[in-house]
Image (cartoon, rainbow, N blue to C red):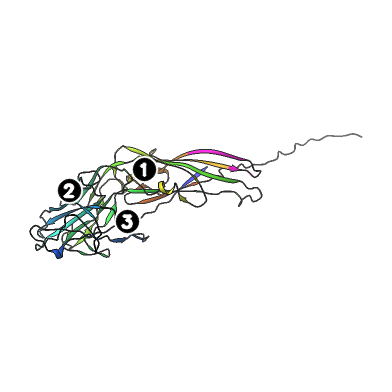
Amino acid sequence: MKKLIVLAALVGVAFTSCVKNEEEGKIDAKQQITFEPAKYKAVDRAGEVVFPQQESFGAFAFYRTTAVASEDHSIFMDNVKISYVAAATPYWGSETLYYWPTSQGSHLDFISYYPYNQDKTAAGVPQISSSDQQQTIQYVNYTVADNTDLMYSDKALNQTRNTLNYNFTGVPTLFRHALAKLSFKVKATMMNNAATSPESVTNWVVTIKSITLNNIYNTGSVTLKTVNVHDQGATTSQWTNQTTSAHNVWNNTSATTTKAWTYDQVLTTTATTYGPEENAAENYFVLPQAFVEAGQSITVDYSIQTTAPGGQSASTDYSKTVHFINYPAVAAWEMGKSITYTLQIDPEGDVIHFAPAIVDWETGNGTIDL
């Protein structure tokens, strides 16, 4: 009696910032590293995203005194909280000011993340490898909670001064989303059959009562790697997912969760977001995951009130569960993807039709004598 139509939209979101740093024994006030909120136009050119002024992110910086490729970096900024500062000239910075090193041939590499956590060992903070010049980061046993976005920045390499990036001056800090995001819209295919039966119209009122996600993996780990290019001047380097999956997902544990939205919403033939504004079924963060047979599913509870041409009316309740793996338009919930599903209900269902036929006449012959 209904169909589910899958629509997927990929939204690229990024933020930029400018950073502050210092060097032992050498401080030049003109070389203070500052953070600035920067705008970044998404890949799909849907608009510009600005890092929210009410939020903070964490920053790590690694220092190398010379240009020798084999030399390791030392920690320079160790999980420093970066926040918006509403000064006469606003900027983004830390409570402790940092300044650029001035030693000949020295540079800084930066890795940032969101949201900031004072405990740098927490599962929501990417763990940075010290054995390969910070070319590996990991999220370990992270559980998606409180519907919180999780982001990590491209690695900024060979930084020696504030430079112009994304229309702002500072260290290029381009954030990428570590999770996937789901939204749900709902609609009815029709509200009456006037188009096909104008002289005998049936009317329907379709009401969705709840939507429930079932068997959703919510705990996992992921390893991301990049390549240092210390011979190319100031630049950035993107991280690559090291999972063996065919999709850009995490390695999940067996732990699953459910999520339900309950709201009586009368449908129209226009797709609208399900739920009230304060608790809508949209922008719901989930662990990036591949679909499995008999795994991730959605249950929709709804009712259809039917008013027949003669005025008789009746209401029937329905509950339907379908598995996401059976809708291949979205093959997986991948990192950095915002996916919108449209749940479409056909109230007409299977209309009763008749198949008329006539049994042929049986023939008989008779003789009448007069």
Q: Residue at x 21, y 49 (%)?
A: 137
Q: Is residue 313 part of the magenta span, yes or no?
A: yes
The percent position of residue 308, horizontal first and vertical second, equals 63, 43
Q: Are marks 2 and 3 in contact (CB under 8 Å)?
A: no
In the image, taking residue 60 as reference, residue 183 lies left or right, namely right
Which mark's residue is nearer the viewer, 1 or 2? Answer: 2
Which residue, as the protein is rendered here, is positioned at the far front? 88
Count residues near mark 1 (Cα–Cα under 10 Å), then give few for <14, some for 14-19, many for 20+: many
**Amino acid marked by disc 1:** Phe
Residue stretch rendered in magenta on the structure:
306-319
The numbered disc on residue 291 is 1
Q: Secondary structure at mark 2?
A: loop
**Amino acid marked by disc 3:** Val
State the CA–CA distance, disc 2 to disc 3: 26 Å
Residue ID for mark 3: 13
Q: Quadrant of residue 357?
A: top right
In front: 84, or 166? 84
Which mark's residue is nearer the viewer, 3 or 1? Answer: 3
Residue ID for mark 2: 129
